[in-house]
Image (spheres, rainbow, N blue to C red):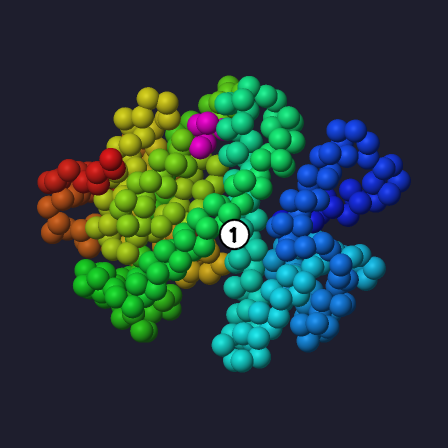
């Protein structure tokens, strides 16, 4: 929606100067029909009308629109529909009823805007790539065709989005309300003592997996080959982390950041990732590191010294291995599923001297991804 809105203003100006003809007219008609279905009708309202209809000042409305990632519109731009007004009213009602503070409402709205923006771009690119591969057309032709083919996909995509959101929200609530006994015990062993008194609220296993030689490989690959490599990497990481009960926090190029509820879960995920890339015929090996400690979770990301230490350990790990620190090793010390091999001390920027420990498979098969 963000990309469409941003492109729509110059597009409307161009149309008024040069009326579309022929095939372009058909494309624009298809795009307008799709827009009406997505936005719930024709754009008939200006920004002040929408704000007033929701009982908001324009300044407050603009804060919410910015949080959603909308572009700036002028007072005379007819850019909104009645559905936009209804959505704005929904957020306003949550604040006025005391369910959310204004700050919380903006933060939740920003989460929705950023996540759906990334999701939409990802979905469009996946569909275009599939059309290029299956239909043998160019990227430009596939993007034009997608406008006509998208209406048949809307209901299914919307249904899956709502279904996934409900499942993910339930999983998050269950993690809050029904913490496993192992997780509670592990939390008490966090780096900063008692959970109520700790400066950072959450005890989690934090891991990084970093592809080896990604930069040099990317220089030798064409665009399509590189895209397939990145997609294979992300898919494999997401699958393993999910099966292990963890959460993929984010992917940055050749690196993934993930968390798990307990040291043992983090260790299983880390070993599975390392093994998967060692055995993969296409992807290079990965350096993996995992640290158990306390974190701050904000804006869908995680922060704190634990995250920084895990990142530093990743750079020290040899390809195809998993490194942890000595305190994480102490939390896994009596678990026969893991073998712990102390390594020479290292001086790490920001942490001084640390004692890395090589994590290896002990008893059991580890994570099984079928």
Left or right: where does residue 134 sit relative to residue 296?
Answer: right
Residue 267 % position (x, y):
24, 46
Q: Quadrant of residue 66?
A: bottom right
In the foreground, 280 or 50: 50
In this view of the protein, which residue sits in the foreground, 63 or 135?
135
Q: Nearer the viewer, residue 128 or 286?
A: 128
Q: What secondary structure is the magenta-colored segment mainly?
A: helix
Q: Is residue 366 visible?
A: yes
336 lies above or below 191: above
Q: Position of residue 369 (x, y in %)?
A: 25, 37
- The percent position of residue 253, horizontal first and vertical second, equals 48, 37
Q: Residue at x 29, y 28 (%)?
A: 278
Q: What residue is rendered at 21% in x and 38% in y?
A: 368
Image location (x, y in percent) of residue 240 = 30, 40
Q: Is residue 262 above or below residue 282?
A: below
Residue tagged by mark 1?
115
The residue stretch that appears in magenta: 227-231
Q: In this orientation, which residue lies closer to the viewer: 211 or 15?
A: 15
């Amino acid at each position: 929606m963000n990309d469409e809105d941003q492109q729509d203003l110059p597009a409307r100006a161009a149309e008024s100067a040069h009326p579309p003809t022929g095939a372009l007219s058909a494309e624009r008609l298809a795009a307008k029909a799709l827009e009406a279905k997505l936005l719930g009708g024709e754009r008939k309202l200006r920004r002040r009308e929408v704000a007033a209809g929701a009982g908001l000042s324009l300044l407050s409305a603009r804060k919410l629109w910015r949080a959603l990632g909308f572009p700036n519109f002028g007072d005379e731009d007819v850019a909104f529909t009645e559905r936009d007004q209804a959505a704005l009213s929904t957020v306003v009602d949550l604040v006025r009823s005391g369910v959310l503070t204004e700050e919380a409402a903006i933060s939740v709205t920003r989460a929705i805007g950023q996540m759906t923006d990334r999701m939409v771009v990802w979905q469009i690119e996946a569909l275009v790539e599939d059309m290029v591969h299956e239909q043998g057309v160019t990227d430009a032709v596939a993007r034009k065709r997608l406008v006509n083919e998208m209406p048949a996909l809307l209901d299914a995509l919307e249904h899956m989005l709502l279904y996934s959101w409900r499942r993910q929200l339930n999983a998050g609530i269950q993690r809050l309300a029904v913490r496993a006994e192992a997780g509670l015990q592990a939390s008490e062993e966090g780096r900063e003592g008692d959970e109520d008194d700790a400066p950072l609220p959450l005890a989690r296993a934090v891991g990084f997996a970093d592809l080896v030689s990604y930069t040099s490989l990317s220089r030798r690959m064409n665009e399509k080959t590189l895209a397939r490599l990145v997609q294979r990497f992300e898919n494999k990481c997401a699958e393993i982390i999910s099966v292990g009960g963890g959460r993929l926090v984010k992917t940055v190029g050749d690196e993934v950041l993930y968390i798990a509820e307990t040291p043992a879960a983090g260790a299983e995920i880390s070993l599975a990732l390392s093994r998967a890339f060692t055995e993969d015929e296409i992807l290079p090996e990965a350096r993996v590191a995992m640290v158990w400690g306390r974190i701050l979770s904000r804006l869908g990301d995680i922060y704190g010294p634990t995250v920084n230490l895990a990142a530093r350990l990743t750079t020290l790990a040899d390809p195809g291995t998993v490194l942890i620190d000595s305190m994480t090793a102490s939390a896994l010390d009596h678990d026969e599923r893991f073998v712990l091999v102390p390594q020479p001390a290292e001086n790490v920027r920001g942490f001084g001297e640390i004692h890395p420990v090589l994590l290896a498979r002990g008893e059991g098969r580890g994570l099984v991804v079928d």
